[in-house]
Image (cartoon, helix red, strand yellow):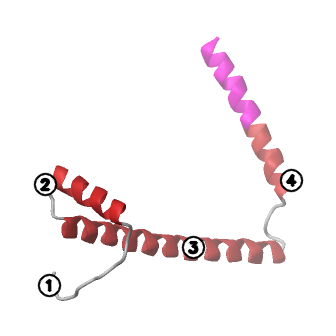
Amino acid sequence: MAKDAVFTMKLEAELRAEFLAATEAVHRPASQVLRELMRDFVQRQREAGEYDEFMRRKIELARSSMRAGIGRSNEEVEAEFATRRSQLCILATRHLG
């Protein structure tokens, strides 16, 4: 990727010194480390946005199901999984005993 932009920033002198010392300790240019940090940040933001959109769609689908009378209440779901947990505990006890 062509490097044709300059990025200037202000930061504390102590942070700058510690960062430069850390990059020197691993024999890597500070600019390379900063580019990697920036790419990682951009990727995490992209993934967070995609996850937020996924959750928004999932929640809207669930709300639509509930409005249509297709969904189950929280109490119904909790009761079903309480039964499942109980059955698993019985099976585990038999297996271990």
Judge whether 82 appears above or below 56 on screen. above
| Secondary structure type for disc 3 | helix
Q: Earlier in the sequence, mark 2 or mark 1?
A: 1
Q: Amino acid at mark 2?
A: His
Q: Nearer the viewer, mark 1 or mark 3?
A: 1
> Which residue corresponds to the image point at 83% horizontal and 77% vertical from the top-left?
67
Pick the residue in front: 50 or 87. 50
Does residue 92 show up magenta in the picture?
Answer: yes
Pick the residue in front: 72 or 32. 32
Q: Nearer the viewer, mark 4 or mark 1?
A: 1
Which dot marks residue 27?
Answer: 2
Badge 2: few (under 14), some or many (20 or more) residues near its Cα, within 10 Å? Answer: few
Rendering quarter of residue 63: bottom right
Which dot marks residue 52?
Answer: 3
Residues under labels 2 and 1: Cα distance? 22 Å
Q: Tell me: 54 left or right of 17.
A: right
The magenta stretch spans which residues? 85-97
